[in-house]
Amino acid sequence: MDLGLKKRIALVHGAGGGLGGAVARALAAEGATVIACDVNPDSVQQTCEAIEQAGGKAIAQVWDLADIDSFTQWHEALVSTVGPVDILFNNTGGPPPSLIQNIDRSVWEHHFSAMVLSVVTMTDLVLGHMKTQGWGRIITSASSGVVIPIPNLGLSNALRSTLVGWSKTLSREVGEHGVTSNVIIPGRIATQRIVALDEAKAGRESRSYESVVQESVGTIPLKRYGKPEEYGAVATFLASQQASYLTGSVIRVDGGLIPNV
């Protein structure tokens, strides 16, 4: 199936990580030119090298999403050298585990800026071109915590839920211009983030890492963690021409983990 992504330009945030890297590789495999962004220069370069070795086209950008004041400059430079963005994959790093109580105001402000305002600001920058050409894709990565809050991930549950409301509202505002806005929710996907969370739980509960993983896998109907490429495939479909009537939705890639309808 031709997903209609050849010659499209995709801006992928967090492309040096497991989820963002998988999305970048999947989009490139369908012919899109990928602008791979990450705060870590080595990891984003590795993603670009993997794409190029597979015959795709990728350009690495070292961006820190906490530096919102630089977004306009970065965007203008990108448009002048590569072209305007057709597909935006919003993907921010997660905050540290914590209870929701007694979090210092400065911590709230820092993570709200890095996880919410960064997404809103970058989306606003790319929407002009999308609306003018009558085609665009906004895809925002969230967390299963927006459906069922995850214990000890208070900041993540709250801030990522904000993005769900924002994305739904946006979909209604830009739909008439041929632009879609969707949220994709990863469940337990085998990335370094999941390893870190499982290790943290093992430490808190004085248990072995292996027992934590076994317990976690046992709650998933498919009885395994997801593969990053499985997540990347769903995100790429959301970016496709075939998904042109899919907007304002929250798509779960969780192996059936979330128990409610």
Image: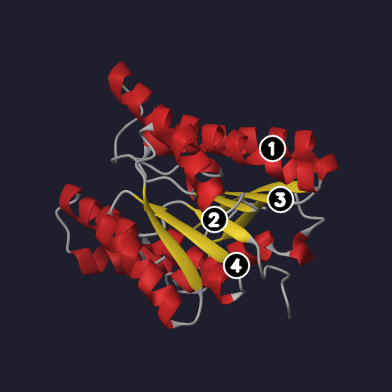
Residue 199: image quadrant is bottom left
In-image side of 209 versus 257 (left or right) = left
Disc 3 marks which amino acid? Gly
Q: Earlier in the sequence, mark 1 or mark 2?
A: 2
Q: Which mark is residue 107?
A: none
Disc 1 marks which amino acid? Gly
Residue 96 appears in view: yes
Separation (CA) of disc 4 from disc 3: 13 Å
Q: Earlier in the sequence, mark 3 or mark 2?
A: 2
Q: Nearer the viewer, residue 8 or 173?
A: 8
Separation (CA) of disc 1 from disc 2: 16 Å
Dot 2: what SS? loop
Q: Which mark is residue 82?
A: 2
Dot 1: what SS? helix
Q: Position of residue 226 (x, y in %)?
A: 46, 70
Disc 4 marks which amino acid? Ala
